[in-house]
Structure formats: C-alpha cells, structure tokens
Amino acid sequence: DKEIERQKQLVVQCRAEQAKDKELSSDNLIKMRRQLAESGKQVSALKAENAQLKQREKEIKRQKQLVGRENIELKKQLKLRDKEIKRQKQLVVQYRANPTKDQELAANNTIKLLQHLAESAKQIKALTDENTQLKEKIKELEAR
C-alpha cells in the first residue's frame, strides 16, 4: 500500500511538473512568436532600407554619368577655345610683324593730318596777331 501511495504521489508530482513544463513551454512559445514577429518587422524594415539604398545608388551612378559626360563636353569646348586663342595670338603676332598697306596708309594719313593741324595752328596764330594789330589801329584811329 505504501508503495502504491508513493507511486501515486510520484504520478501526481510528474503531472504537476508536466503541467508546469507545458505552461513554461507555452510562455516560451508566445515569447518566441513575439520575437519572431519583431524579427519579421526588422527584416521588412531592413529590406525597405536596402531598396532605398539601391535606388539612391542608381541615382548616384546616373549623376556620375551625367557629370562625366558634361566634363567630356567641357573639355572639348576648352580645346576648341584654346585652339581659337592660339590662332588669334598667331594673327596678332603676324599683324605686328607685317604691317598692312591699310596700316601704312592710315599712318601716313595721320602724319599728314597732324601736319595740317600744325599748319592751321600757325595760321590761326598769325590771324590772331593780325586781328590784335588791327584792333589796336582802330582804337588809335578812334582816339584821334
């Protein structure tokens, strides 16, 4: 009888422990499900962030290509301008080294014009002097 009683107590204890284990397992299962749900949310957030990063990466790559094309175009324009500057410098050097007939004619005409101006200045001076003398003679005649 004692043995049966002891075995009954053991069975009751076992069942209590199983119930306790079942309860703990149930709590653990609930916790694990919550953690799994949270992990799922985190994975979704990371996937969304990854998609945004990939999109931004594409945009940056496209911008780099545009800037690269623009740089190539600007370099072409610079080369053309450098060629034009060089050509114009050569023209200036050539112009200075070989005066043209037009330049010589302009220089000669300028010299003639300056000579005429000098001659005109002399004539004006002479006329001014003569005018002054005539005014003095008029004053003398009026005074008599």
Image: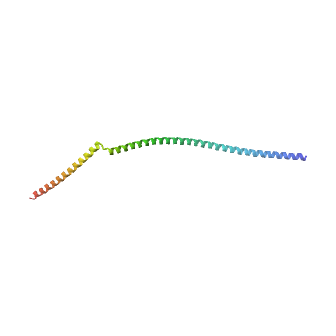
Residue 54 picture location, percent across and down:
58, 41
Name the quadrant containing residue 8.
Answer: top right
The residue most toward the right is 1
| Farthest-out residue, front | 97
Quarter in which the C terminus is drawn: bottom left
Q: Residue furthest left?
A: 144
Q: Which one is nearer the viewer's eye here, 53 or 2?
A: 53
At x 45% / y 42%, what residue is drawn?
A: 75
Closer to the camera in the image, 85 or 99: 99
Residue at position x 27%, y 44% from top? 104
Which residue is drawn at the image coordinates 41% and 43% (left, top)?
82
Where 141 sits versus 60, above or below?
Answer: below
Q: Position of residue 90 (x, y in %)?
A: 37, 43
Q: Residue at x 25, y 46 (%)?
A: 108
Query: Is 134 left, or right, of 72 in this rendering?
Result: left
Residue 105 spot, x, y in % from top left? 26, 44
Residue 120 location (% of width, % of height): 20, 50
Q: Quadrant of residue 47?
A: top right
Number of callouts: 0
The residue closer to the viewer here, 101 or 113, is 101
- In the image, 109 versus 1, the foreground residue is 109
